[in-house]
Amino acid sequence: MTAKATAAPPITPDRLQDELDELIRYSPEEVIEKKWLPYKSPRVLREKCYRRQVIHHNDGGKITFTAEDIRRENERTAVLPAAA
């Protein structure tokens, strides 16, 4: 292989921002405020996390969500249409 074929793609500002967004952790309040998950209050979301019913991170006893957690939770709770 040539050096050109094995070189990593250039880092564009959009790609860099996407990678940085994956590192951000969101609180239950932020997730509810931005309506990323179908819960009405941060308290309900926290209680679901305590019961391990929602995908989340437990960072030092603090419940947080990454973009991947939110995507996986939305995927998990999706309802597929019935076959006609």
Image (cartoon, rainbow, N blue to C red):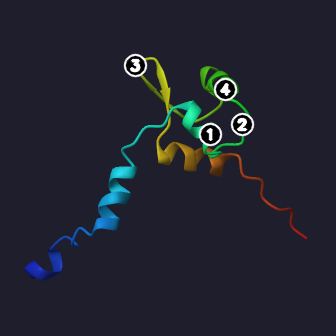
Foreground mark, 4 or 1, reads: 1
Give residue 81's position: percent from left, percent from top.
82, 62
Q: Of discs 2 and 4, which sits in the foreground?
A: 2
Measured in 3D between alpha carbons, the distance from the residue under mark 4 to the one under mark 3, in whole angstroms, is: 18 Å
Residue 7 in view:
yes
Is 44 placed left or right of 71 in the picture? right
Whole-angstrom CA distance, mark 2 to mark 3, is: 24 Å
Q: Label 4: which residue? A: 48
Q: Nearer the viewer, residue 2 or 34?
A: 34
Nearest to the eye among marks 1 and 2: give it: 1
Q: Spot the residue most to the front.
A: 33
Q: Quadrant of residue 83?
A: bottom right
**Secondary structure under badge 3?**
loop
Label at residue 60 = 3
Residue at mark 4 to residue at mark 1: CA–CA distance = 17 Å
Q: CA distance from mark 1 to mark 2?
A: 10 Å
- Look at 47% across and 21% down and name the residue there: 62
Along the polypeptide, which appears first: circle 2 or circle 3? 2
CB under 8 Å between discs 2 and 4: yes
- Check residue 39 in the rendering and tell me which mark sits there, or answer none: 2
Mark 3 or 1, nearer chain start? 1
Q: Is residue 84 left or right of residue 13?
A: right
Q: Residue at x 51, y 32 (%)?
A: 27
Rendering coords of residue 54 (x, y %): 62, 33
Mark nearest the camera among 2 and 3 is 2
